[in-house]
Image (tube, helix red, strand yellow):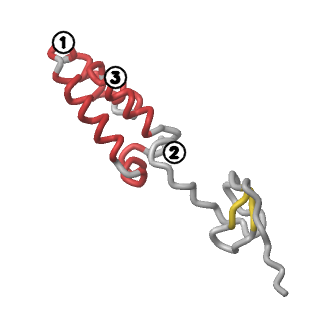
Amino acid sequence: MTNAVQKAADEKFCSECGAIIKAKAEICPKCGVRQLPTPSSFSATAPNGKSKLAAALFAIFLGGLGIHKFYLGRVVWGIAYLLFCWTFIPAIIGFIEGILLLVMSETEFNRKFGAVE
């Protein structure tokens, strides 16, 4: 007879030692290893706190004003978008950038925009 350990709905197994821990735990209390976040294509945030979904929505809806560039820390580009917003070219480019942000992988987003200042 085996003593199979059952985990609850709000629990998960540690990626290193296999211990049952809370699903929201960032670090395993047993072995101390940081847990990888669950893969979620839109809701995850970068190490600097920037959200891929927020950046994409800013680009799609406010891209003509360069709001997404300011949000992502690209201030010079944001100013350029503001200077040329009357041409509607930044709006078209912002819309395309928003779609590209939506389909970008989390690792690519973190590499490009996730650096902690």
- Position of residue 64 measured from the top left corner of the image (x, y, whole percent): 26, 20
For mark 1, give the secondary structure. Answer: helix
* Horizontal arrangement in the rendering, residue 67 relative to residue 48 (left or right): left
Q: Tag 3: residue type?
A: Phe
Residue lying at the far top of the rendered structure: 86
Q: Which residue lies under the disc numbered 1?
A: 86
Cα distance in 3D space between marks 3 and 2 = 20 Å
Q: Does residue 82 sit above or below 11 in this rendering?
A: above
3 or 2: tag closer to the N-terminus: 2
- Image-quadrant location for residue 96: top left
Q: Amino acid at mark 1?
A: Trp
Question: Mark 2 is on which residue type?
Answer: Ala
Residue behind mark 2: 44
Question: Which residue position holds label 3?
Answer: 61
Q: Nearer the viewer, residue 20 or 112?
A: 20
Query: Depth-wise, is mark 1 or mark 2 nearer the camera?
Result: 2
Point out the tag, 3 or 1, that comes first from the N-terminus: 3
